[in-house]
Image: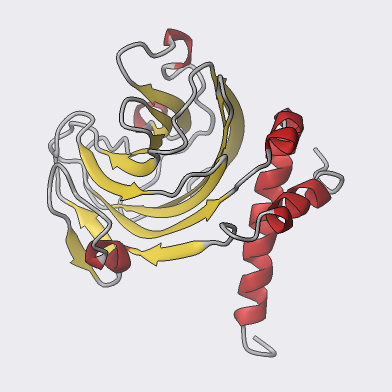
Amino acid sequence: MRYSGLLPLAVAISVACPATAGTITYTGADLYNSPAVSFPSVQPNVVGTSLEFPKGSGHNAMQLKLPLQSASGYAFSLSLTRTGTGEWDPHFLLGDGSTMLGGVYGDEAQGGLAFNCVQANCEAQHAFNSLFGSNDVPILGTLVVDIVFRLDEASTAILLSFSGASTGSGGFTFNTPLNKNTLFFTLLDDDDPNSSYRLNSLSVTPVPLPPAIALQLTGLGLFGLLAWHRKRKATRAALSRPNGA
């Protein structure tokens, strides 16, 4: 699939709203020390610059909560390292206080991502029916997840991409909107008593879209936004390397 024709639209969206555009990257230690971040279910430990969550916090226990500013879209990139021997199903979700939407890594499917909804009236068809990828992450192996949300008045579109023991990507649209004024990013735990992992880094990019543009940013446009997000990260990484490196 070619993204080049879609990148100008994504860049134009970013330039059109400079007041809230810009990526913030946190290490686990940054999140631990931030007064805005809470750990509702269990207190994590700082290991180097990573944040390690203890084993068996409980089914769908909220391990981390990061409040976010109002926006019409968000892009997240996170790096996780598996440390426990048990089943690990880390959830990475965008919530508004009543509903949480996003993804979950399902190692019972030999490694892969699914789109996930946490609320009383979730649409049943998506529950682990959208798994993609294979080859589970080994102990002390790293999983990198990119997840983009587009928030519309009547729906939430999500694009997931991951790399590690295997790679994959896919998109899903929930017929469930999120309240843009009460947004937060969260990590949820599985209930395996031997499950644990580290959060090494989390990058957060708000994407404030004017309504007219948001209506045009469908399907392929969302993939273009992810491509733009990755290209910008790669460019920054290249510029930060010493000459000749």
> How far across and how far down the image is residue 170, in percent?
61, 31
Q: Is residue 162 visible?
A: no
The residue lying toward the viewer, choosing from 166 and 179, is: 179
Residue at 74% x, 37% y is 213
In the figure, is residue 68 to the left or right of 206?
A: left
The quadrant in which residue 40 appears is top left
In the figure, is residue 75 to the left or right of 234?
A: left
Residue at 38% x, 31% y is 106
The quadrant in which residue 21 appears is bottom right
The residue lying toward the viewer, choosing from 182 and 192, is: 182
The residue lying toward the viewer, choosing from 18 and 188, is: 18
> How far across and how far down the image is residue 99, in percent?
36, 25
In the figure, is residue 105 to the left or right of 38?
A: right
Residue at 65% x, 65% y is 234
Residue farthest along the right direction in this orientation: 5
Q: Quadrant of the C terminus?
A: bottom right
The residue lying toward the viewer, choosing from 140 and 57, is: 57
Q: Is residue 202 visible?
A: yes
**Image colouring:** secondary structure
Image height check: is 229 above or below 95?
below
Residue at 39% x, 23% y is 117
> How far across and how far down the image is residue 147, in percent?
53, 42
